[in-house]
Image (spheres, rainbow, N blue to C red):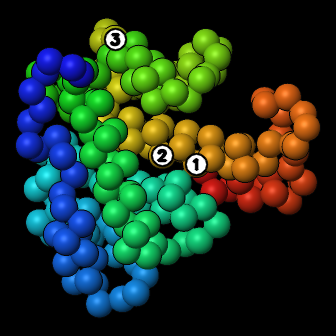
């Protein structure tokens, strides 16, 4: 935001740092297991909050969100994943004032709107119901960092694929999929 001083921790790591981390796997491309190790068990993990423990589902979603039909990441795609994660983390932090790794559902809606996904109120309501949880029957629903990352990765993947499938000459919000393409999309989520 203008006028606010940005914390150095808000910046993603340098490309040279990320290249070193990537090359530690000694591969030209990394899969979901490699990505999970890099996010959780290297110096890269220190660039995220303590609530940023990633799991294999995160890795698969992040790869799908950046590499689409591939199941591996190149160095450039890995850098894109880390940049996305830092963007999403910084937006989450703005709403997680007590740094407990949890935000209110309205904060999720605000973040998704700021990411310009252009979702209808009904779709936003479905997302909030899907990604918020209650710790007990007396508490209000909250969104954990883990669920937030899943929502952002899925929406990024869906958004990119929908734009790539927009039918030429038709209104912007119409897409054309074969049954097989739709099944592949649904199964990748």
Task: Classify 10 Å Cα crowding around label 2: few (below 14), some (14-19), many (20 and above).
Answer: many
The answer to which of marks 3 and 1 sits earlier in the sequence is 3
Task: Classify 10 Å Cα crowding around label 1: few (below 14), some (14-19), many (20 and above).
Answer: many
**Residue 49 shows which numbered tag?**
none
Q: Quadrant of residue 114?
A: top left
Front-most of residues 5 and 61: 5
> Picture coordinates of residue 96 (x, y %)?
20, 24
Question: Is residue 141 something that shows in the picture?
Answer: no
- Disc 3 marks which residue? 140
Q: Secondary structure at mark 1?
A: helix
- Disc 1 marks which residue? 157
Q: Quadrant of residue 139?
A: top left
Front-most of residues 169 and 144: 169
The answer to which of marks 2 and 3 sits earlier in the sequence is 3
Camera-side mark, 3 or 1 = 1
- Tell me: 112 left or right of 8: right
- Tell me: 117 left or right of 2: right
Q: Secondary structure at mark 2?
A: helix
* Residue drawn at x 45%, y 30% as measured from the top left: 115
> Picture coordinates of residue 126 (x, y %)?
59, 22
**Quarter of the image with the N terminus in it:** top left
- Disc 2 marks which residue? 153
Front-most of residues 128 and 121: 121
> Picture coordinates of residue 35 (x, y %)?
34, 69
* Residue drawn at x 12%, y 32% as measured from the top left: 6
Q: Secondary structure at mark 3?
A: loop
């Amino acid at each position: 935001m203008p006028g606010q001083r940005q914390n150095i921790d808000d910046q993603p790591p340098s490309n040279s740092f990320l290249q070193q981390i990537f090359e530690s796997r000694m591969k030209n491309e990394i899969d979901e297991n490699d990505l999970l190790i890099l996010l959780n068990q290297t110096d890269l993990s220190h660039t995220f909050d303590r609530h940023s423990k990633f799991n294999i589902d995160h890795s698969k979603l992040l790869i799908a969100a950046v590499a689409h039909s591939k199941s591996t990441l190149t160095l450039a795609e890995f850098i894109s994943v880390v940049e996305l994660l830092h963007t999403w983390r910084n937006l989450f932090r703005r709403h997680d004032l007590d740094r407990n790794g949890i935000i209110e559902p309205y904060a999720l809606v605000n973040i998704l709107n700021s990411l310009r996904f252009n979702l209808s109120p009904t779709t936003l309501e479905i997302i909030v119901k899907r990604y918020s949880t209650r710790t007990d029957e007396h508490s209000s629903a909250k969104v954990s960092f883990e669920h937030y990352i899943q929502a952002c990765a899925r929406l990024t993947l869906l958004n990119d694929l929908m734009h790539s499938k927009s039918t030429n000459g038709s209104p912007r919000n119409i897409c054309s999929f074969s049954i097989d393409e739709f099944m592949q999309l649904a199964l990748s989520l």
